[in-house]
Image: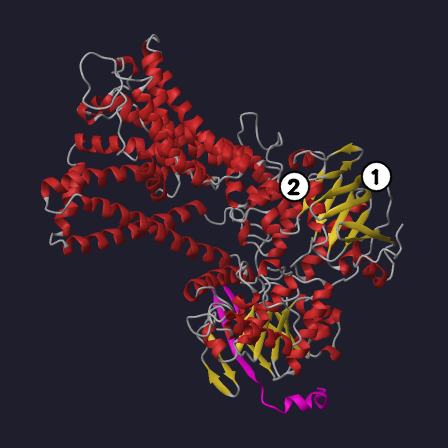
Amino acid sequence: MATEGTAIPAVRRRAKPRWLEGFLVQGGALIVAFLLSLLIGAIIIMLLGESPLAVYSSIVTFAFRDADSFGQVLTIATPLIFSALAVAVCFKGGLFNIGVEGQYLVGMVTATWAALKLDFLPGPLLVIAVLIFAMLGGMAFAGIAGALKVKTGAHEVVTTIMLNGIAVSFLGWALNGPLKFTEEGVATDLRSDKFLDNALIPNIGSWFGIRSSADLSLLLPLAIVCAGLVWFLFKRMRLGYEARAVGSSPGSARAGGISIGAVQMKLFLISGALAGLVGMQQLLVDKGALVQNYEAQLGFTGIAVAFLGQNNPVGIVFAAIFWGVLSRGETALQIDTDVPREFMIVLQGIFIMTVVIVYQVTRRWAARRQLAREGDVERFDDSEAEIDESRGEQASGGGLIGGGG
Amino acid sequence: MNDADEAGRASASPLVVLDGITKRFPGVVANDDVSLELRAGEVHALIGENGAGKSTLMRVLYGMYPADAGRIVLRGQEQRIASPRDAIANGIGMVHQHFVLVDPFTVTENVILGDEDGPILDTEAAEAKVADLAASYGFTIDPGATVEDLSVGEEQRVEILKALYRGVEILILDEPTAVLTPAETQDLFENLRRLIADGKSIVFISHKLDEVLEIADRITVLRRGAVVGETTPDRTDKRQLAEMMVGRPVLFRLDKPESHLGDTVLRVDDLRGGRLKGLSLEVRAGEIVGVAGVEGNGQRELAEAIMGLGTIEGGSVSLGGSDLSGESTQEIRNAGVAFIPEDRHEQGLVLNMTLWENAVLGRHDDDDFSGVGGFLFIKRIKELASRLVERFDVRARSIDVTAGTLSGGNQQKLILARELETAPKLLVAAQPTRGLDVGAIEFVWRQILEQKAEGRGVLLISAELDEIYALSDRIVTLYEGRITGEFAPDAPADEVGRGMLGDVAAVES
């Protein structure tokens, strides 16, 4: 124990602003991870026979050279914010929602249905209805995974992956059936009819002097508001509190009277609602119609962005923008350098891995430091032992006494 | 002093000398110039409160931590032990408090893991080898059994076998009896005596004084990272050891407040499901009923059934006359039942959440702490936490630290504070002092007695007979999911013991 004896006063509140300390540690970790990734990337660029400096400066200038460029970065970031938030909401409660991909495809189908069939709604009511239907579609589809998890114990990773496949087929079916192209002429691709203008999301590029082809829309502020709501949910609301308890210690949560199933179901529904909005940039800004598109993979990218933002809503907004910079970099590489555009995918991978690793190392270090500071040697020992033992297991394939063998 | 007694052993040079070991962690000196001698063929007990530095010292010897100062002399020669691998090569093995076994593997597979003879496994030969080894030390264990089917005591034997298989001469046991029942402890001691007879030496880390006095040849007491004394069992007693450990006199029997029995608070009737095979008992207001029994006879299931955490197949649980069976945990808590779980990490606290977040767990939906819209009243929750932490003297730097940073005793205090704050009608206390040191045990016991004095009912479920005797107004024994006997608090221990083993011919009432 930090025992009766040691010179620790019984609770001194606000000894030091802990949030500031945490912020510095996290920020430091991020900078280290960032520099490390750039370094690894630089080595690869050099192996490709190019100058790292030239490549990096091309990526940066291309993203930030003018308002239009940055507008496009933000446009790429917008759906990723929704997607990563959807992943993070589940993750906080210990659930791994791999199904954002499928949930957003279903959301696009239900939104399209609303846009085409509810076109009698006047003015902004139509677009609001479309967004609501997008969320309902995502919720319904996420709800299937949630119900299977809660009622049968089927693991959400398995069910959501399977449901993703169903969603792709569902979208294909919808475009061949209820949402089939009925306009004059021939569509070159599999698509629905064009939506009315008042089903579309207003472009806000002009507010910032960004040309409208950058497609910056009201969805960006909506995404940021959603990030704020998610932050509020986990910091200030009962459900968020319960979710964190369930995610960290299901047994203690249950003994505390929390219904784990109810919490998980609610998280899936919230996650699904956010996922439903992922496809709206494409549907209601870029295209104005539902177009079959298997390649976007916004749901999976959202997992990466959530990781990069450490499942923190604020972190996610910045991670999504950062992702936008990297994605724009693909074009930069093609214009300015001989490095193949696929390098950006490699660089994205490097960033995720480095961030995950550096954060993990930092977390252990911080936990140890905190434990040691509480003057609690015994507990400290335990956590050390666990780390040591798991290392031992990795090293010797199942460590006995400590990790030698 | 009494050199004649020890002349025989002391004449040989010590097997291990730890000389002036100092180990610092950021902000803490875990070991401060600690010296210790282990002689060949002895059981050397290392005792002290949690945090006294016992485990740290032994982890230095086992190569898990480098010492900041001091040296290790092994069989007369100074030795650098840089890793557990080095330690094992030098004949030093350690069995940790938390076992590291692969559950789906057999005993043999676990024992040889990491020390296999070549790439192709000859399971039969290995099994024979392990069986021989076990037999030579009188370990009863089936080498072909799967570890997940073993009892805790048997798993511990596997851990010890793992060390012996690697030819270890010096065995460090970290709190080996913390997870054992009294009977299993006796089995372990029997095994240890065989090991000693065979010339092995043992370091026995513990804070259970009766056991130390029973098994140890010599005892070293640590307090706050320093050695405060060395003695032998015949020169000391429990009270003196406790005082050395804690640094002040400790009471072992608290005065029980007089009982004023009220109405029946808890009535458990013919409860069935899982290990429970028709269990009935009653607790009245102002009464502590102690459920004694060897673990695994339904203790956990009983507590969980009352709290609405398990599935009940038959029978009923009622509180003050109203039926609780089938109600949710939340409703049961709201009805006035408080719960100290046997595993505070698994069912008590969320370790990576803050003290204030933990302080409100289970009451977070009270109108005081969250509103209709589902918003938390954080200021009020923090006020509650500060109040609890102060009243129960939880030692922490602030209420914003995570619960995982607290010592076991302080974690338990936090749980007690939270559970007792609601003025419950009934307290279900399962193994409430497990893993705590003497000082913390005294604190917890006082709190439980306080509940009784306040006229609340307490169901105490404990594997420690000492604890049952110290607190109970009435003792019932639990065996194979049934109550097998009821005893007065002054009934002889062997009668209660018979009840614990299901000898129903005892004083069934």
Over which residues does the magenta segment extend? Answer: B1-30
Nearer to the camera, A282 or A68? A282
> Which mark is drawn over residue B264?
1
Question: What amino acid is labelled 1 in the image?
Answer: Thr
Label 1 chain ID:
B
Residue A68 on the magenta segment: no
Q: Position of residue A256 (x, y in %)?
A: 62, 40
Q: Position of residue B347 (x, y in %)?
A: 61, 47
Give the number of the mark in front: 2 or 1. Answer: 2
Which quadrant of the view contains residue B159? bottom right
Label 2 chain ID:
B
Q: Using the rendered image of the protein, determine whether residue B420 is visible from the camera's viewpoint.
A: no
Residue position marked by numbered label 2 in the rendering: B309
Q: Position of residue A147 (x, y in %)?
A: 51, 32
Instruction: Give the left or right position of residue A341, taking residue B283 as reference.
Output: left
Instruction: Give the left or right position of residue A320, taking residue B264 as reference.
Output: left
